[in-house]
Image (tube, rainbow, N blue to C red):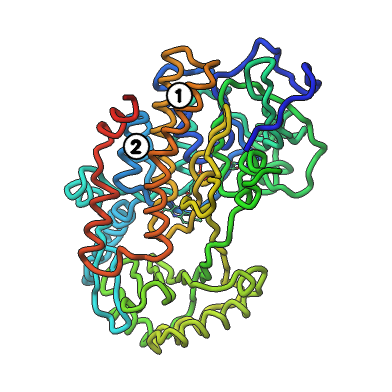
Amino acid sequence: MNIPQSQSTAHPLTDTPINKIYDVVIVGAGPVGLATAVGLLKRGIDNILVVDQARAFRQVGQVVDLLPNGLKALQYLDPNAYEAVKTASLTFINSQQSDDKKTTEVIEPKPPKPSLEWVSKNFQGQKIRSISLSFDVWFKNYGEGRVSISWYDLQTSLRQLLFQDQVKPNHRCINVVDEQEFGCVRLDCVSDTSVEANPYAYWADGQKNNDIQSQNSDSDPEPSLTKSFRAKLIVAADGINSTVRKILYANSSNQAFAKPEYSGFAAIYCREIPDIPNELLKHIEEKFFAGSPIVTLTNYEHISECPRMLLINRHILGYILHIPVEEIRVQGKSGSDLLDLTLQELEKAGFPDALKELVRLSPPENMLQRPYYIHRAALTENIPPAWSAGRVVLVGDAAHGMPPFMAQGANQGFEDAMVVTTLITNIASYNNWDNKQAIASAFEKYELLRRPFMEYIQEATLTQFPDSSNQAWQEYNKKVYTRNFDQVIAELLV
Ligand SMILES: Cc1cc2nc3c(=O)[nH]c(=O)nc-3n(C[C@H](O)[C@H](O)[C@H](O)COP(=O)(O)OP(=O)(O)OC[C@H]3O[C@@H](n4cnc5c(N)ncnc54)[C@H](O)[C@@H]3O)c2cc1C
């Protein structure tokens, strides 16, 4: 596996002078790329740049749960990042506090106080276990808390800790070239010229340009401008569909690992079911929710094959079904096809009638699907697809993206950021930017530490083995949440 070599000594598209070489360029301003940048800056490495393909940063993405291991890694990267993320988080506690305020203004009897628990139940409505949604309960159990935060708020909180000129949106990386003659790597990006000319146009330009959504969408592309940057090291945090990964693995024995593989699981979900008959709603609330805002339902005797239904009741009632299914059965399907498939799967798995009745009420236009992909951490071939080549290293979803069933994608990515940041800081402190051996050995250490742990997390995600018994659950929690990161870091630097 190699980075393509440069063919000539000059590159016409590089607008940075050759004496401008960044120490680190990070591809992708998602949670992991930004956490890496924040960690480097905190350690005095400020000759850095983050590029992202988004034409401008906007409200996108789902809610992400940050668990003790991810929060501990973030705290290690920069205590200010940890505080900023905690402050911006939208835990159920906050929403419940505002609900409480509302109910005090009403003179009617108060409804039962919602519990701060995510409950798992079997089809008979019996509780198998519950997960606290309270930061403090997690803190008490694992030495660190748990928060929920939208992907965009997470991105914004981290981005605001960097200098404005250190993060460039509207720069889609399309190529990486090893420029040995200059002792660096070159990154080629394309930008949309109109956004580059005035990135803040939509704030100032009246009605015409007020629609951020259309301004930032990928439709109606303007002519592209190509720009290049040079760096001693490149950290590729460009997500599961990573361009850098494809470049590294192209034309090599790792070609098969360039693109993400279908994980075998997909989500089918309904944002909202309106008009639920009172009797059905009451039955579902009493039997399944019983005061919790979210409940997982599955057949705990066949956990790896049975679909899991996440019922969510926060002002509106909706659900997410995680099912083992062929990709072609969900990809590109209409709302009514997805509804039919959901009902078939619920029937096959023996879900209770009340839940099937509920699903039948889903408006087809509210039905959505999302196949889940993976970059497997387990090595199945003799030649491992390494997470680095020369001066380039893959982190986060670009290295080991996976379905979100154990809520570990971003949390594991923060662990990568913690390790890679420490190792790069070590390279900087010995001025080893041009020491190929030191760079190779740093990235090897990163992979040796992180790959086996990712194998464990991915196995838990795909087989759901922690759900097989209370003991397995406790062991998983202990192994993932209670590690001592000071010791991990100390061993890394030996
Ligand atoms: C439904 C769902 C629920 C989830 N829930 C959780 C959860 O509860 N807890 C958890 O820990 N994880 C969760 N995850 C996973 C989590 O969202 C990801 O693991 C995490 O976002 C990965 O971060 P990243 O920075 O590696 O990649 P991303 O978040 O994918 O960010 C990649 C960035 O790179 C940019 N980019 C891509 N290509 C290029 C390019 N060529 N050039 C420049 N920029 C580029 C993108 O614009 C993006 O900003 C969930 C995922 C899903 C889908």
Residue 360: % across, % down: 51, 84
Residue located 49% across and 32% down the image: 159
Residue 41: % across, % down: 44, 22
- The picture quadrant where one finds residue 356 is bottom left
- Taking the image as shown, residue 145 lies to the left or right of residue 3, namely left
Q: Secondary structure at mark 2?
A: helix
Amino acid bearing label 1 = Ile
Q: Is mark 2 within 8 Å of ligand 1?
A: no
Q: Residue furthest front?
A: 382
Question: Which one is in front in this view, the residue at disc 1 or the one at disc 2?
Answer: 1
Q: Can you tell which mark lies on residue 73?
A: 2
- Taking the image as shown, residue 269 lies to the left or right of residue 461, namely right
Residue located 45% across and 71% down the image: 319
Which residue is disc 1 drawn over? Answer: 424
Mark 1 vs 2: CB contact within 8 A: no
Q: Residues within 10 Å of mark 2 (few under 14, many from 20)?
A: many
